[in-house]
Each structure stands twice: as C-alpha cells, then as structure tokens.
Amino acid sequence: MDTSGIVLEAVRKVYPDGTVAVDSLDLEARAGEVLALVGPSGCGKSTTLRMINRLVEPSSGRILVGGTDVMGQDPVELRRGIGYVIQHVGLFPHRTVAQNVATVPGLLRWDKARTADRVAELLDLVGLPADTYGPRYPHELSGGERQRVGVARALAARPPVMLMDEPFGAVDPQGRRRLQREFQALQRELGLTVVMVTHDMREAVLLADRIAVLSRGGVLEQLGTPEEVTGSPANEFVADFLADFGEAPAA
Ligand code: ADP
C-alpha cells in the first residue's frame, strides 16, 4: 500500500505582503522516491517544502501525505511524523548529541531504554558511534558531523517522509560527497520518501529519482528523471537553468 507518498494539488501560497510565492502547483513525490526541487533563488522551493509540514500554511489547494490531508491534522503531530533537515541543522547547543537525537522520542514519551537503543542505532547508522559521539556537544563536532546528527535526529521516530532543505549546503565539498552517498544508501535501505530542495543541479542529479524544475511563483517547468531533465530540457527556461551549471552533470 502506498502510505507515504506526497501529493500537492493546486497549492498556492500568498504571503501577507502580497508575494505570490507559489501560484498553483500540482506535484507528486511517490512513496520511496527522492524528489528534488530545483530552480533559481526565490522561485518558491522552500515555501513548497515548508507547506508540506505546515511550517508555512498554504493559502489554498490541498496537500496529502500518505493520503491524508495535512490541513486536517494537528501541525505539531504532523511534524513529529515528518523528518525535517535544514542547512544549518539547528542542533540544541546545550544538549549532547545523544540528547539531540532523542528529541522526538522524548516528545513521544518513549521509555529510557527504548530511546537509548534507538539513539545508539541511529548514530551508528549515520557513522557516528554512540559511545564516542553521544556524550559530545554540537560545538565539538565538524560541520559534516553536525549534519549527520541532524539526519539522525530527523530519523528518530522512523518517519516515512523526510523534507530536506539544502541539507548538505553547509558541508565542505569533500565531506558533502561522502554524506550524499551515505544518505542515498540510508534512504534506499529505509525506503524513505524524500523531498529535497537544492540549488545545486549536481546534487539533484546525484541523489534524485526525479527532478522538478521550478521557475518564479512555483511554476513547474519540468518534472522528470535526471536523464530526462538533463538530456531533453522541456523548454528554454530549463535549458538556461542547466547551462548555468557549466559542464552540466552527466546523469
Ligand atoms: P526559494 O526557496 O526558491 O529560494 P522561497 O520559497 O524562499 O524561494 O521564496 C519564494 C518567494 O517568496 C520569494 O520571492 C521570497 O522573497 C518570498 N518569501 C519567502 N518567505 C516570505 C515571507 N515570510 N514573507 C514574504 N515573502 C516571502
């Protein structure tokens, strides 16, 4: 059964100042796929992503996660079931790595033993052995390690869906490549449905099953596999966007 796909139907967001960030977007992330949202700065990528977990309230249209309309759910509950990873990962600085990863289990009132097991499992999963890293504080980690902790924290309650906004943007280039590959392995292993915002076409080609190219106002210019988008751009906008990436990445 398809329980974790995401469907956007005629979704629109007008901010209070009148900015039409997303005009009328229809889009689907199928269960188990990585969908990358790419496009120039200000085209509505983050707004689109943040409407899925209701950090931004849609002005109209419908968003279904696992077949359920997000507007019918309590936003806090909704967010506990959807992993969210952002560029500057926002770890709690005065909590240890283990405590950071245990945030959602704590909110869900898991008992201590179950939480500790899950934290150890997750830290191992992202390559940070719990014995070494669990007791550390965020300032004692490298940027890449912090990002891994962010991913572990987002995975804590086994969400079937992850939203990621420039998740590897703050990591140095060598570290980023490794982290991307590790994330990909993890995503496949867990069968996660992922919507990822990136301004980096290379990252989209590397990680996404399908790429949605957006232009200003959240207009969907093309939706396709990396091969389709890079091999046959649907129009001039997409071709120009790809051209900005120089030796556009081979899919
Ligand atoms: P992207 O992620 O593609 O860079 P955003 O979704 O952040 O784009 O922004 C889309 C548009 O909405 C931009 O014009 C941006 O300035 C505007 N915008 C974003 N957040 C707000 C806000 N809180 N209030 C008003 N306008 C906003």
Image (spheres, rainbow, N blue to C red):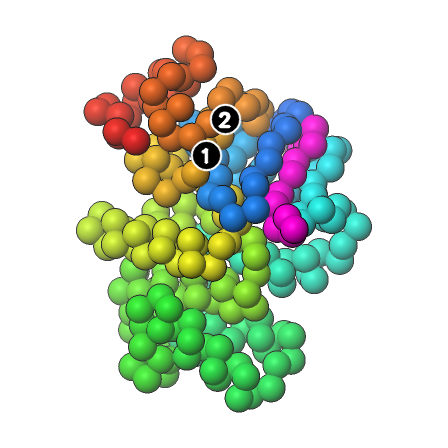
For label 1, the residue is 210
Find out whether the residues at labels 2 and 1 contact each other: C-beta distance under 8 Å. Answer: yes
- Tell me the number on the disc at residue 223: 2
Front in this rendered view, residue 5 or 214: 5
Quadrant housing the C terminus: top left
Sequence-wise, the earlier of marks 2 and 1 is 1
**Callout 2, which amino acid?**
Leu
Give coordinates of residue 42: x percent, y percent: 49, 30
Q: Which residues are magenta?
A: 1-15
Label 2 packing within 10 angstroms: few (<14), some (14-19), many (20+)? many
Extreme residue toward the front, this view: 1
Give coordinates of residue 3: x percent, y percent: 65, 52
Residue at (44% x, 12% y) in the render: 235
**Element carrying mark 1:** strand
Give coordinates of residue 13: x percent, y percent: 67, 33
For the image, the number of numbered tags is 2
Determine whether 197 is above or below 81 in the image.
Answer: above
**Element carrying mark 2:** strand
**Callout 1, which amino acid?**
Arg
Ligand 1 closer than 8 Å to label 1 CB: no
Residue at (32% x, 57% y) in the render: 182
Please give left or right for residue 244 compared with residue 99 in the image: left
The magenta stretch spans residue 236: no
Q: Is residue 114 in sight in this rendering?
A: yes
- Tell me the number on the disc at residue 13: none
Determine whether 96 is above or below 27 in the image.
Answer: below
Q: Is residue 99 in sight in this rendering?
A: no
Determine whether 57 is above or below 227 in the image.
Answer: below
Extreme residue toward the right, this view: 72
Magenta segment, principal secondary structure? strand
Residue at (26% x, 30% y) in the render: 249
